[in-house]
Every structure is written in C-alpha cells, then in structure tokens.
Image (spheres, helix red, strand yellow):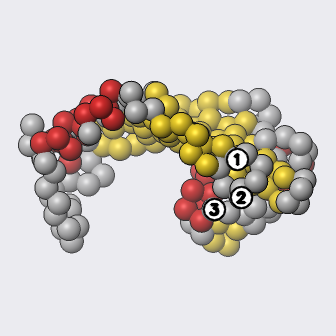
C-alpha cells in the first residue's frame, strides 16, 4: 500500500453527542452525513449543534471552558460563558460533548489529495505508519465540563480519545489540578501494538 492510499481517505464528522448543553438535557446523538440539514421551529435547538462544535473546539484548542465568544465564531457566535450554556443554567450539571470522525474511501473528493496538496510539506509515510493509518476507520473525542464551586469557575473534568470505537486514552481531574491528568493509556489497543 503506497502513501497515495492515505490521501484518498476522506475525514468527515460522522456524529455529535451532547448532554446538558443549552436546550439539550438528555444525552442525544445526531448522525452527520455528507449533507445534513437542521430544520425546526425557532428555539428548537438547531444552533445548539453549531454552538456545541464551536465550544468543543474552544476547549480543545484554547483550554477555555468558560467561553463567551469563540475563536472560530468571532462576533457571530456568542456562547455567554458556562452559566449560559449549561442546561437550565444549573451549575450542578455537567456538560458532555463528543464527536466522531470517520475515515472513508467513499469516492468523494478527499479533503487533502495529492492534487490539491500544493504548498503542504511532503512527508512520505513509512510502511509501518501507512499500515497503522490504513487500519483507522473512525476516531473521536469526548469531554465533560463541570462547574467547580471551590474554584468558582468551570473546568474540564474529563476526556476520552477513541480509535475505531475503543478508548485509546482517557483522563480526569482529581480535584487538585486545573486540567485532567492522563489516567489510562490502552497500550493493548490493536493499533498501538502496531507502533
């Protein structure tokens, strides 16, 4: 299998799961397809999906669990901070957001192909890395954010990173640190055994 095969895989958001975020109380999973339309009455929660994605990115990229505005949304997306995002404004609830990506060779134009990779530094994969990547079908991340009464602010409580539906690593706060610490690395995951 040559390096070209990795470039043919399309990476796409396949689902988002939300709990206790804005209008969504119960854990709800929304499958995402190449074309997904959100429609409904005003205040039905359509923008909640977009806000959850922007909030997740703000946490992962900027460690900002109390985001009023997001880097990606600028002036267009005002989240209003944790107090306004948590369901029913209840600081005893924990926000939970998860996303999954699928890596598919579905015949659609890939996000990054050799043809449109102009300007991207070439980094040929060795055979071991190519074999590893060829086994990845999907990956995901899940996070939880809770309000700390002792710190008087929201903190990232836990995270999980998944490959092919299995947790590969996870972490949680023990109450003494601002960020979760790594609590588990699944070194027995079949893909990690390849590395």
Picture residue at 72% right of the left edge, 63% below the top: 67
Is residue 83 left or right of 145 when viewed as pictured?
A: right
- Asked which secondary structure carries label 2, the reply is loop
Is residue 68 placed above or below 31 in the rendered structure?
below
Question: Crowding at label 3, few (<14), some or many (≥20) Cα neighbours within 10 Å?
Answer: some
> In this view of the protein, can residue 78 be seen by the observer?
no
As displayed, is residue 116 above or below residue 95? Answer: below
Q: Residue 110, position in %: x, y? A: 26, 47
Front residue (pair 27, 190): 190
Q: Secondary structure at mark 3?
A: loop
Q: Residue at x 77, y 49 (%)?
A: 175
Q: Which numbered disc, 2 or 3, marks the residue that appears first in the sequence?
A: 3
Crowding near the residue tagged with mark 1, few <14, some 14–19, many ≥20 C-alpha atoms within 10 Å: some
Q: Which disc number belongs to residue 178? A: 2
Kindly report the distance in space between the C-alpha atoms of the residues bearing marks 1 and 3: 14 Å
| C-beta proximity under 8 Å, tags 2 and 3 | no
Circle 1 sits in a helix, a strand or a loop, which is it?
loop
Q: CA distance from mark 2 to mark 3?
A: 10 Å
Q: Earlier in the sequence, mark 2 or mark 1?
A: 1
């Amino acid at each position: 299998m040559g390096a070209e095969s990795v470039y043919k895989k399309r990476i796409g958001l396949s689902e988002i799961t939300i709990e206790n975020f804005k209008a969504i109380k119960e854990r709800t999973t929304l499958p995402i397809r190449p074309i997904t339309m959100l429609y409904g009455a005003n205040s039905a929660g359509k923008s909640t999906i977009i806000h959850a994605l922007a909030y997740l990115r703000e946490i992962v990229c900027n460690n900002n669990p109390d985001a009023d505005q997001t880097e990606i949304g600028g002036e267009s997306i005002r989240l209003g901070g944790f107090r306004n995002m948590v369901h029913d404004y209840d600081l005893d609830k924990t926000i939970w957001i998860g996303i999954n990506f699928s890596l598919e060779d579905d015949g659609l134009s890939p996000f990054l192909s050799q043809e449109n990779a102009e300007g991207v530094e070439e980094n040929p994969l060795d055979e071991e890395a190519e074999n590893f990547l060829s086994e990845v079908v999907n990956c995901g991340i899940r996070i939880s954010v809770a309000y700390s009464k002792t710190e008087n602010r929201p903190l990232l409580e836990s995270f999980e990173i998944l490959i092919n539906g299995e947790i590969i690593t996870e972490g949680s706060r023990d109450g003494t640190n601002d960020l979760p610490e790594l609590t588990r690395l699944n070194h027995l995951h079949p893909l990690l055994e390849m590395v």
